[in-house]
Image (spheres, grey):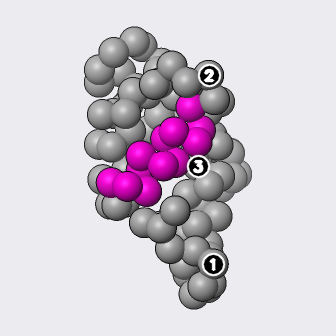
């Protein structure tokens, strides 16, 4: 039986693959796919975080780059839950 953490990680990989095959190259997430995946977030926040995490500046996120997005979004969500003034998702 898989632990909750392993099941969560599997879900992350599955979600990435579900969206990365929608447009463009297989196993790369372009900005349109990225926006569709994270529709709840403010467009300016998405542009900023996409640009920050597209390390090779090819306008697509590899899975490795996507894991950086997850870390940033998770950290921001954690700060919001705890009402940390340092974090507002749509702020630069």
Label 1: how many Cα within 10 Å (few below 14, some 14–19, many 20+): few
Whether the magenta-drawn stretch holds residue 47 is answered as: yes
Q: Which mark is residue 86?
A: 1
Left or right of 43 on screen, residue 69: right
Q: Counting residues from the N terminus, which is met first, the one under dot 1 or under dot 2?
A: 2
Is 50 situated left or right of 84 in this image? Answer: left
Q: Can see residue 14? A: no
In the picture, the disc for residue 65 is none
Q: Is residue 78 magenta?
A: no
Residue 68 x %, y %? 64, 43
Chain part drawn in magenta:
43-54
**Residue furthest out toward the front:** 92
Q: Quadrant of the N terminus?
A: top right
Residue drawn at point x = 52 percent, y = 28 percent: 61
The residue carrying mark 2 is 56
- Report, in whole angstroms, how far the alpha carbon at label 1 lies from the one at label 2: 28 Å
Callout in the foreground (3, 1): 1
Gap between marks 3 and 1 measured at Cα: 18 Å
Callout 1: SS = loop
Give the image quarter of residue 34.
top left
Q: CA distance from mark 2 to mark 3?
A: 18 Å
Q: Is residue 57 above or below residue 82?
A: above
Image quarter for residue 35? top left
Answer yes or no: do the residues labelled 2 and 3 have beta carbons within 8 Å? Answer: no
Residue 10's place in the image compared with 29, above or below, is below
Q: Which mark is first along the chain, 3 or 2? A: 2
**Mark 3 lies on residue:** 70
The image position of residue 12, as x and y in percent, is 54, 42
Of the pair 57 and 8, the residue shown nearer to us: 57
């Amino acid at each position: 039986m898989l632990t909750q953490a392993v099941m969560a990680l599997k879900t992350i990989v599955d979600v990435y693959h579900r969206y990365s095959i929608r447009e463009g190259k297989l196993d790369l997430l372009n900005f349109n796919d990225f926006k569709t995946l994270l529709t709840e977030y403010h467009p300016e926040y998405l542009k900023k975080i996409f640009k920050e995490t597209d390390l090779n500046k090819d306008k697509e996120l590899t899975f490795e780059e996507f894991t950086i997005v997850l870390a940033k979004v998770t950290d921001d969500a954690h700060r919001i839950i705890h009402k940390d003034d340092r974090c507002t998702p749509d702020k630069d």
